[in-house]
Amino acid sequence: MSSLNVKNVKILDTDYISYDISIKLKIMYDLMSYLQARVQALLNELNKKDKRIQELETYIFELCDRDCPEEYKYVIKKQVFNDSSEV
């Protein structure tokens, strides 16, 4: 009779372990999904910043040209300093 009880306990332990593993897998899947979304959001933000840096580098190059008109310099300065909250 004691061997019968041991078998029943093992079955219950196995069921418990299986249920516990499925909960942990769901939690891991949710965590992985969250982290992937976070990485994607960070990559999108990095892409925006890289584009802005390229734009600012172009402005610097154009402003360094001796033949650059003063009106254009004024427009660029206004645009750069008005959009400074982005960076």
Image: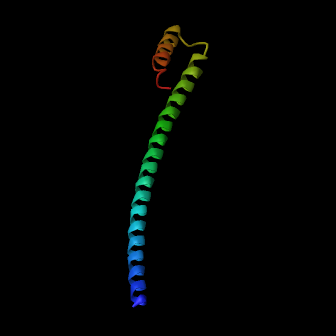
To which quarter of the image does residue 19 belong? Answer: bottom left
Where residue 18 appears, as percent x and y from the top left, is 40, 71
Relative to 31, residue 47 above or below: above
Task: List the single residue furthest toward the front.
Answer: 1
Q: Residue at x 49, y 20 (%)?
A: 84
Image position, residue 24 (x, y; %)? 43, 62
Q: Residue lying at the far bottom in this picture: please name it.
A: 1
| Residue 19, above or below 38 | below
Identified at 42% across, 80% down, the residue is: 10
Q: How is the image coloured?
A: rainbow
Q: Residue at x 50, y 29 (%)?
A: 52
Relative to the observer, which residue lies in front, 29 or 43? 29
The quadrant in which residue 6 appears is: bottom left
Percent across and percent down for residue 86 are 47, 25
Total marks shown come to: 0
Counting from the top left corner in percent of width and height, residue 31 is at: 44, 53
Horizontal side of 65 relative to 14 (left or right) equals right
User: Going 56% across and 13% down the picture, which residue do you hit?
Assistant: 68
Looking at the image, which is closer to me, 21 or 57? 21
Query: Which image quarter is the N terminus in?
Result: bottom left
Q: Foreground residue, 51 or 36?
A: 36
Image quadrant of residue 30? bottom left
